[in-house]
Amino acid sequence: QLQLVESGGGLVQPGGSLRLSCAASGFTLDYYAIGWFRQAPGKEREGVSCISSSGDSTNTARSVKGRFTISRDNAKNTVYLQMNSLKPEDTAVYYCAARKGCLSPILGSWGQGTQVTVSS
């Protein structure tokens, strides 16, 4: 079972920053690409960013490019999403998921996610 646990969400003012973490439980992240996704109320889940298993390749949605940065620390079995210059439209539940590659379907099931709320 590929179980990932998201954390680091919270309430932040517009322009603020948060760093989300995606930690693996019971398996090693090294062999997997990891994607971050988000789902805002009333909207479909969308891909935000993805990082290859080696960390050499990333892709990021146009809506967050230049503000969000994905990274991974395989020694800590964790992938991060640094979110800067947050906007109210970034408000969503954020999820991470393992994939064979960044163009592959997710493996396993969705976790609980972590809520990010951007509001003054």
Image: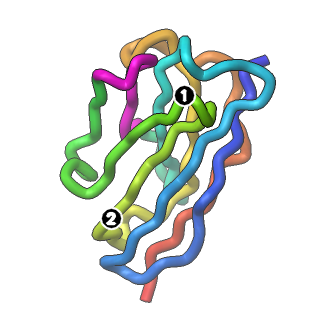
Q: How many marks?
A: 2
Q: Is residue 17 left or right of residue 7?
A: left
Q: Residue furthest bottom?
A: 120
Q: Residue 115 falls in which quadrant of the image?
A: bottom right
- Give the amino acid at mark 2: Asn
Mark 2 falls on what kind of element? loop
Residue 16 is tagged as none
Q: Is residue 100 left or right of residue 103?
A: right
Q: Nearer the viewer, residue 99 or 80?
A: 80
Image position, residue 60 (x, y; %): 28, 38
Q: Residue at x 42, y 83 (%)?
A: 13
Q: Residues within 10 Å of mark 1 (few under 14, many from 20)?
A: some
Tell me the magenta residue range: 47-56
Q: Residue at x 47, y 50 (%)?
A: 43
Residue 84 is tagged as 2
Instruction: From this view, report whether residue 108 is shown above or below residue 49.
Output: above
Image position, residue 14 (x, y; %): 35, 80
Q: Residue at x 72, y 46 (%)?
A: 112
Image position, residue 40 (x, y; %): 50, 56
Q: Which of the image's four quarters has the C terminus?
A: bottom left
Reading the image, the residue beneath label 1 is 74
Q: Is residue 49 magenta?
A: yes
Q: Residue 7 falls in which quadrant of the image?
A: bottom right
Tag nearer the camera, 2 or 1: 1
Q: Residues within 10 Å of mark 2 (few under 14, many from 20)?
A: some
Mark 2–mark 1 contact, CB under 8 Å?
A: no
Instruction: From this view, report whether residue 8 is shown above or below residue 24.
Output: below
Mark 1 falls on what kind of element? helix
